[in-house]
Image (spheres, helix red, strand yellow):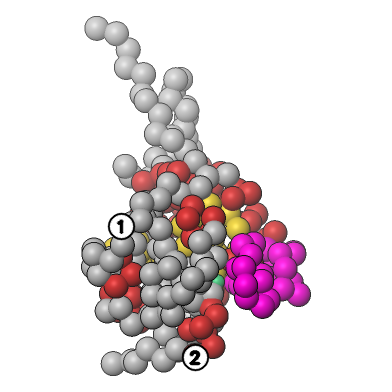
Amino acid sequence: MRKLIIHPIALLFSFHCLICTFLICSCTTTQIGKSDLKNLKTSSKTGSGPVSPGHLYREIKVVKRFIPRGRYGRKYKRPMKPRYITVHSTQNYNGDAWDHARALERGKLRAPKRRNGNRIGYLTWHFTIQEDVVIQHLPTIEQGEHADFNGPGNNYSIGVEMCEHRGNSRQRTLERTAKLCASLMHQYQIPLKHVVPHQHWPRKGTKPEHKNCPHFLMTNGRPGKKWSQFLRSVKRQYNRIQAPQSVAISGN
Ligand SMILES: [Zn+2]
């Protein structure tokens, strides 16, 4: 069994640091050729074809492993109406998503509780993403403790952490993260401009105030080309979503 080894610096500063409904228009009969069908199937496999919201959610493969209610990072009731999505990376090169889930479930990710700092004595966030799965640790209608102490990043945002353990494909992790962001945007009507890096939120009283997180999507510690590219991939996934359309049934 692998042990969760978290670099102390990472701990202190990072952890926060319907059948695919190819609704071909329904009002009139649309002729679909074999080649069209093949193209649709191919694009679905590669994650670029149109999808229903439910289908996209299933593509992401979310496994729910909630921190026990009323304990550790959920010992206080802290309801939230999500308005932002905050993207992080773990800066943990040893632990995978399952390791992080175990650590959160067992209350292992402690943080000093202090005035104008961590409010609950634990680090918490909502989702951890790796190349092949997303694990959910908190309901999205509860606050996490991952971004900016008593700031809007914690009070109003869903925290998502991308894994960085050795052997994990960054590209596939980024694709899965883009899909998760798109799915959450759709579910909570969050605009693309409210998908932000952890770097976006100032952490008052710390130096630097704006953390370089997720570091591999920042350019000189700030959002630049790599972040814009990531946002474009989120937008591409969001644009795939097609709300289920009602099928017109002719009279009698
Ligand atoms: Zn972060």
Q: Is residue 202 magenta?
A: yes
Residue pictured at 51% horizontal, 83% vertical: 12
The picture places residue 20, in percent across and down from the top left corner, at 38, 45
- Residue 48 point in image, percent of width and height: 53, 52
Which of discs 2 and 1 lies nearer the camera? The answer is 1
Q: In this view, does 8 lie above or below 222?
A: below
Q: Label 2 sits on what residue type?
A: His
Instruction: Name the chief secondary structure element in magenta.
Output: loop
Q: Where is residue 94 in the image (x, y as percent from the top left)?
A: 45, 89
Q: Earlier in the sequence, mark 2 or mark 1?
A: 2
Local secondary structure at mark 2 = loop
Q: Residue 77 carries which label?
A: 1
State ligand 1's quadrant.
bottom right
Of residues 195 and 236, which is closer to you in this image? 195
Examine the rendering and report whether any part of residue 205 can be seen: yes
Which residues are drawn in magenta? 200-227
Kindly identify the residue that appears in the image at 29 percent across and 73 percent down: 72
Q: Quick check: 186 above or below 102?
A: above
Residue 35 shows in this picture: no
Q: Is mark 1 on a helix, strand or loop?
A: loop
Question: Which residue is farthest top?
Answer: 252
The amino acid pointed to by label 1 is Lys
Quarter that holds the N terminus:
bottom left
Nearest the camera: 173 or 89?
89
Give the labeled residue for mark 2. Answer: 7
Q: Position of residue 39 (x, y in %)?
A: 51, 49
